[in-house]
Image: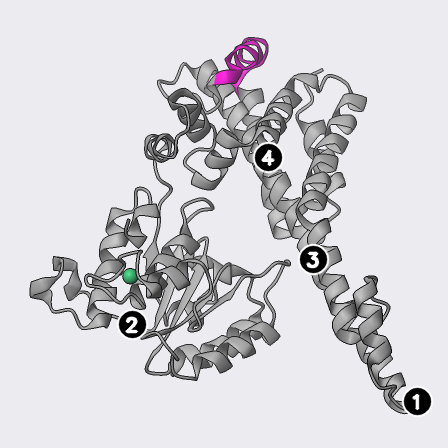
Amino acid sequence: MSVWDVLIGQAPVVEILAGAASAAAGVTATDARPAARASMTHSWLFTGPAGAGRSMAARAFAAALNCKNSPPGCGECNGCHTVLTDTAADLRTVRPEGLSLGVKDIRELVRDAASAPTSGRWRVLLLEDADRLTDQAANALLKALEEPATRSVFLLCAPSVDDVLPTVRSRCRVVALRLPTPAQVAGMLEHDGVDPAQARLAAQATMGDADRARALATDEATRLRRAEVLRLPTRLQRTGDCLAAAADLVAAANADAEAANTTRDDAETDALKTALGVGATSAGTTAKRARAPKPGAKARALTVRGATGALKELEKTQKSRGRRTVLDSLDRALLDLAGWYRDVLVRQLDAPVEAIHPDHGVAVAEEARTSTPEQTLRRLEAVLRCRRTLAANPGLVPLLTVEALTLDLRTG
Ligand SMILES: [Zn+2]
């Protein structure tokens, strides 16, 4: 299985990347695919909507660049394997977990980029969600993009070219990924052993987002969550219903965030406390601390201050990560809702297109019968507006924004 096989429906992209990897490996055009004539460059920007597989494509490319076989990207050798499992010494991945990617992370990345690869052929700096770069961080990156080290390559990922500063964008070769078609996603799920009908429904309901489709096809909690969200439009008769529905949506998103982060937050805090030698909870740590030499009073004061600062910093990172998880979860719910209203509109206009949520056809038909296309369009627009508002203002209180939405969707 080659590294490119995971890139569903991205044939043109695979051709470009495989060609560049061949060129980088010095494979001549006669013994490689025609695209091997494509050249290698030091900065790449992978764009595409969520679920298109931006970072998967970047990682496949990173693997191919350090592959030991020809044509590069075998997926089997040590070079490929260590990159794919994120254990390669020459790969550094930066994945912002909070709402933004700060200058500190980028400075470290840039420092790394300056040194030659140790075991592989290329030092790869993979920056997921480059759209979250702060301006200061983007400027720190710019210098490295302008004067790249001979054997370093930057792989940036962002939803679109407009999501990164023009100065950064202009120094990158853009690789645009598309969402695969639902049929392609269904094919992938079937290949992985999902029942064909289930695979089709999951692919259709997630509109080609392969990651979400897989979750929907294989995870019961995701299925229940979607069903709950899609029941929401039918329970918005009175103001009280609307406020309750908004509270439910936000509570579910908060629960998602808690489920995703709590264990990890606690482990991180514990590890940091252990490292700093302050108030760690495990018995082993206390024993280690007891054996450590006692610092002088002044040094101790400094240590305590440093530890408090480090813990505060970690708390800030965790808060930001939690907030992002809540917003991501809400966004998925809103996307499902938008699909539902779109189905209603399709039904009202008798448009010859497939439904996004065919398993909710009865409720959709009822809504189509009891409302006008103008009302549906207005509601669909309200959902999309809410998505935009939350995306553009991560500092807003989500509940108020979602309440404004459910009141807009009221049917009574
Ligand atoms: Zn390989």
Mark 4 or mark 2, which has the lower sequence index? 2
Identify the element where label 2 is drawn.
Answer: loop
Is residue 132 shown left or right of residue 114?
A: right
Circles 1 and 3 in contact, beta carbons < 8 Å: no
Find the magenta span and give its range: 359-373
Q: Local crowd at mark 2 within 10 Å, few (<14), some, or many (≥20)?
A: some
Q: Is mark 2 within 8 Å of ligand 1?
A: no
Circles 1 and 4 in contact, beta carbons < 8 Å: no
Please provide percent x and percent y for residue 177.
35, 50
Report the mark closest to the observer, 1 or 4.
1
Report, in whole angstroms, how far the alpha carbon at label 4 lies from the one at label 2.
39 Å
Query: Does residue 313 show up?
Result: no
Is residue 81 shown left or right of residue 289?
A: left
Mark 1 or mark 3, which has the lower sequence index? 1
Task: Residue 160: name its quadrant.
Answer: bottom left
Q: Is residue 55 above or below residue 222?
A: below
Mark 2 or mark 3, which has the lower sequence index? 2
Q: Dot 2 corresponds to which residue?
A: 41
Q: Local crowd at mark 1 within 10 Å, few (<14), some, or many (≥20)?
A: few
Report the mark closest to the observer, 1 or 3.
1
Mark 2 or mark 1, which has the lower sequence index? 2
Is residue 9 shown left or right of residue 34?
A: right
Q: Quadrant of ligand 1?
A: bottom left
Mark 4 or mark 3, which has the lower sequence index? 3
Using the image, tell me which numbered label, if any, was put on residue 297: 1
Q: Is residue 168 above or below residue 259?
A: below
Q: Residue at x 89, y 84 (%)?
A: 301
Question: Looking at numbered disc 1 in the image, what kind of residue is underneath it?
Answer: Ala
Task: Residue 254: name its quadrant.
Answer: top right
